Image (spheres, rainbow, N blue to C red):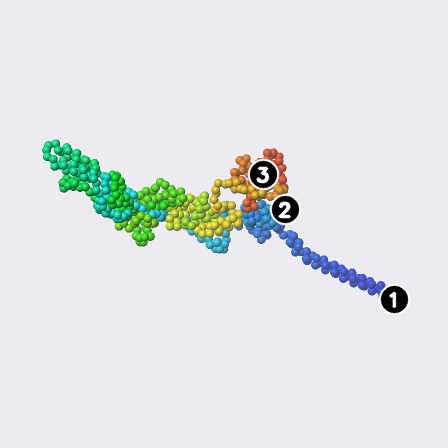
Amino acid sequence: MKNKNILLAAVTASLLGASGYGLYSAGMHRGQTMTMTMATPMASAAASSPIGAAKAGDSGKKVLYWHDPMVPWQKFDKPGKSPFMDMQLVPVYADDAGDDGQVKISPRVQQNLGIRTAEVTRGNLMSAATAVGSVAYNERDVALVQARSNGFVERLYIRAPLDPVRKGQALAELYVPEWVAAQEEYLSVKRMQGTGMDGLLGGARQRMRLVGMTDDQIRLVEASGKVQARLTVFAPTSGVVSDLAVREGMTVMAGAPMFKINGLSTIWVNADVPESMAAQVRPGNAVEARTPALQGTVFKGKVSAILPDVNPATRTLKARIELANPSGQLVPGMFATINFSSAARKDILLVPTEAVIQTGTRSVVMVAQGDGKFIPVDVEIGSETNGQTEIRKGLDVGQKVVVSGQFLIDSEASLTGTETRMEGMATPTPSKAIGPTHRGEGKVESITKEEITISHGPIPTLQWGAMTMGFKVPAVGLPNNVAVGDTVVFEIHPIKDGAFEISTITPTAAAPMANKKDKAMDGATKMPAKPTGAAP
């Protein structure tokens, strides 16, 4: 009985052991299956492209270079981490980059920017310049009345300045003592009888002329036989008395000014003409003048002279305009608007004036290239009238120019790293360094006016690995002995906007060293040194 119990216990233990092993084996198999199922996505993720590389979905696009969107003008030939920001470099595709200074903008963005274009046309341009000025007396129509002899002012007919006078009107009456003696001498000689009196009579008549009497006054004395002790002064011309220098009871000396009379039949307008309009205004040009005081009245005249003097404060010249003023409506001090007209310029290129951007050193227009592409073009402009500007050089008929949104396009060019922009090409000045200088060695890949591209080895002081990137050319230019393909030793320093500029650059002297460097660069191309934080 005891043996049976022992046998039963052994069989039970064997069955339990087999069952446990089966359950353990099933559990192990299930665990392996779960492990494999979970590992599949990770393996797929490990097989994906590295960070910064072009995605498979973009295989149809050609990657031109990688850049940091915050520093778009710096280009890199490989993906990796930006040396400027804590971010990965972004690829720039051929379809998205601006070729030859172009910037591409999608139709939706164009609509948001409010971009409008207009065609370059041929036509005629009537130059019509406008200027403002003030009315003044015609200084060529002035009469000055002076005392011909010493005397006293007994009566004054014109008592206030700016009184109007007519030609032949009496102005004043003078008592002239010197005339009395000369006239009495003449009358005494005339009464004498006898031969040889003609000479004495002629001498007495000449003496009356010397004291200031006119031939008409002398004839009056001869005809009346009486002494004319008083002189009446008459106006020699019509106008206004702009200067009154005498009063009743005054003593006047010979030659003293008494009245100044300005004529009003013609009037001057001294117009301020900007220097830029000087070529359009010439003596003899017909003009039309309007004044706020006489609404609806147009005065016609011509340019009398361009005064050879420039106001240094306003940078304007004085154009002297002569206008007919038969009714005397125009008086000195009035403001007038002058419209200058000149011969029409025929068969010239025209664009809307708003399309032309003045940068200070050049004139630029944004030309639409089609397919959403735009490029700035330097132009030479001529005259401008009624919203149209003459284009002398830079454009052709039929091209489309942007008339609104130019600066927004320029901002878009800055964001996409387009090299050609609208800023002026002024004389370069050295960039201000904002950090220490770093040394590197490499091979010159390309040289442009603004940038030199170098395939360089690691730069430890910047924690940069081997890469190809562009550096700003110094303002003084590169040495003449630096050419594409040279192996060089260079120093760079940071400037504004995170860019780097060449401080010094020198070709390496030893050829073996250059060959060794080329091999090192080839090795760097195959197995680039990883910059700090760059993707594997």
The three-letter amino acid code for the residue at tag 3 is: Phe
The residue positioned farthest toward the bottom in the image shown = 1
Q: Residue 379 location, x and y as percent?
A: 43, 45
Q: Which of marks 2 and 1 precedes in the sequence?
A: 1
Mark 3 and mark 2: Cα distance apart in space = 22 Å
Looking at this view, is 119 or 341 the one in front?
A: 341
Mark 1 and mark 2: Cα distance apart in space = 78 Å
Q: Residue 34 location, x and y as percent?
A: 70, 59
Q: Quadrant of residue 453?
A: top right
Q: Quadrant of residue 29?
A: bottom right
Q: Quadrant of residue 175?
A: top left
Q: Secondary structure at mark 1?
A: helix
Residue of label 3: 490
The three-letter amino acid code for the residue at tag 2 is: Thr
Q: Are marks 1 and 2 in contact (CB under 8 Å)?
A: no
Q: How many numbered discs?
A: 3
Residue of label 2: 532
Residue of label 1: 4
The residue positioned farthest toward the front in the image shown = 249
The quarter of the rendered structure image containing the N terminus is: bottom right
Q: Tell whether 368 sits left or right of 142.
A: right
The three-letter amino acid code for the residue at tag 1 is: Lys
Q: Residue 173 location, x and y as percent?
A: 22, 44
Which of the labelled discs sits on residue 424, or is there none? Answer: none
Looking at this view, is 450 or 283 the one in front?
A: 283
**Crowding near pointer 3: few (<14 within 10 Å), some, many (20+)?**
some
In this view, the mark in front (1 or 2): 2
